Amino acid sequence: MSTLKQTLRTDLTTSMKARDEVRTASLRMALAAVGEAEVAGKVAKELSDDEVRAVLTREVRKRREAATAFADAGRAEQATRETVEGEILDAYLPAQLSDDELSTIVDRVLTEQNLSGPRAIGPAMKAVREAVGGLADGGRVAALVKTRLAG
């Protein structure tokens, strides 16, 4: 079992004992998503820490989107709960790169690969995502790559 998955299970037990309903619900939801990812596909498999992080990243993004949708619909209580759930899961992910760090990586990759112009967006995105790993949101990466290649 991956270390991160074990940490999630241990923290779930702790939150259940502490009767922390929001944390318990958030961790149960995250572990359910990990379980679904493990049995997806033709063969069930044990996820690595990186794969568990990818699932958590997806779940955090879902919570942010749901919070925005609830807020736009005037449902502040649900928006707040989604935001809190997202923050709980985000604590299990590595810190995101700052804008300066991300800019440096994008510039380095574009220079190393000699990529320029709008037609290079696809290859540039692939190369930058590999360089960044999961340390920056895809939307931030895409916006920066498009800006650098457009101008």
Image (tube, helix red, strand yellow):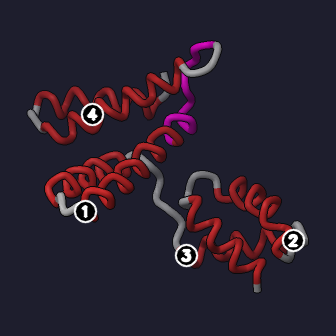
Q: Earlier in the sequence, mark 1 or mark 4?
A: 4
Left or right of 140, for residue 71? left
Q: Given contact means CB atoms under 8 Å apart, are the residues at marks 4 and 2 in contact? A: no
**Mark 4 residue element:** helix
Mark 4 vs 3, N-terminal side: 4
Measuring from the top left, give residue 35's x and y in whole percent: 44, 23
Q: Nearer the viewer, mark 3 or mark 2?
A: 2
* Label 1: which secondary element: helix
Tell me the residue that label 4 is attached to.
11
Residue highlighted by disc 1: 71
**Please, what is the three-letter code of the amino acid marked with disc 4?**
Asp
Q: Which of label 3 and label 1 is nearer to you?
A: 1
Q: Position of residue 64 (x, y in %)?
A: 36, 56
Mark 3 or mark 1, earlier in chain: 1
Q: Position of residue 5 (x, y in %)?
A: 42, 29
**Hey, which quadrant is residue 116 in on the image?**
bottom right
